[in-house]
Amino acid sequence: MESDLHQVIKANDDLTKEHYQFFLYQLLRALKYIHTANVYHRDLKPKNILANANCKLKICDFGLARVAFSDTPTTVFWTDYVATRWYRAPELCGSFYSKYTPAIDIWSIGCIFAEVLTGKPLFPGKNVVHQLDLMTDLLGTPSLDTISRVRNEKARRYLTSMRKKQPVPFAQKFSNADPLALRLLERLLAFDPKDRPTAEEALADPYFKGLAKVEREPSCQPITKMEFEFERRRVTKEEIRELIFREILEYHPQLLKDYINGTERTNFLYPSAVDQFRRQFAHLEENGKNGPVAPLDRKHVSLPRSTIVHSNTVPQKEQTSIASSKNRQTSEEYNKLSRDNEIPVPRPIQGPQRIPLAKPGKVVGPVVPFEYGNVVKDSYDPRAFIRGPV
């Protein structure tokens, strides 16, 4: 994917109504698949929606996503600081409700679609209070029934004391948009989460007539708790070590096979990786955080492993022959004759010692004033500076 929806909105001011419809269709189609898996994205925004030159969109960045299991009594344990503030649902602004629903993602999709229509964020709040003010400026003050379900007491008091605001007609806010698109957008941006449609219900809206068929849109099997058993199980320190050890062995199939079979490969010149891992883990366990990372026989983990080389080299007996004796005698006589006829060669005269050049501005010591081959008789400063050309 070459870009994201944020860049598409920012760089293109000539998007057509067909673009708007196709973008929203793809987002709701993807959201239907995610929600049927019982996953809430919780951080939908234009920068988390990838786009390519063919106007295909893909939702990315599931770093804040959570799974809502069907038998979970409540989802209040989720942190309230989810989603970028501008695309955050009202129930996430101050812990409004006791149980979150997929409607939090539906609200974000509505904010994104409104930004596609206008080219700018719909609710660019500076803080939570300002965010609520912007929402109520457009949607009006929520009903007393909606306010009564607010879990946070401070937020409930703030909404109750808020002056009465009338909702702004969406046709006035988005004057050039398709009326069918605005009717769907108004449903997506309902203040009360129970009034928002699901992704599947939104795909059945008349706005997508001839484009979407709910029965053909993909769905996902719900994620079960078995797939998250590793997060729910309490493990000991030894079990964690074993899991890490097994994960390392996954990248060494032969060593993993030896480990499972209980065989040790001791016929190598180097110790096996299994033995090395075991020794290092045992060393860390004994010494804790205060001891060295590597065993004492290796100062650094990056150094090569110690090796044992068995040498069977036996010094060979000196073998002499008549020919070799004659050659040695001839060589000694030649060397003696060369020393007798040696001509003494005088040692070369050592050149003047090189004086290191001074850097610009560095004091090099007292000097005699000298100019064009003549000694200057005027007074001079014994401190001379070597400077670069002016």
Image (cartoon, rainbow, N blue to C red):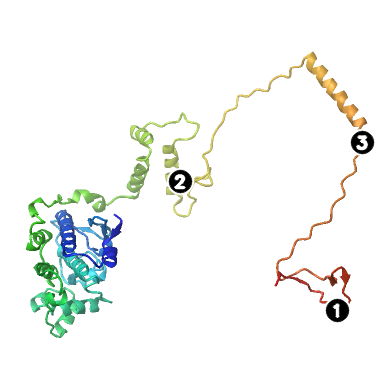
Mark 1 or mark 3: which comes first in sequence? 3
Closer to the camera in the image, 119 or 197: 119
Query: Is 98 rendered above or below residue 222?
Result: below
- Left or right: 337 in relation to 179: right
Picture layout, residue 130 above or below residue 313: below
Residue 232, image x, y percentages: 24, 53
Q: Residue at x 86, y 27 (%)?
A: 335
Disc 3 residue type?
A: Ile
Residue 172, labelled with which disc?
none
Rounded to the nearest whole Å, what is the CA distance between mark 1 and mark 2?
77 Å
The furthest residue to the top = 322
Using the image as rendered, state which of residue 386 and residue 341 is in the foreground: 386
Q: Position of residue 281 (x, y in %)?
A: 42, 45
The residue pinned by badge 3 equals 343
Amino acid type for the residue under numbered disc 1: Ser
Q: Residue most toward the front?
A: 14
Residue at disc 3, secondary structure: loop
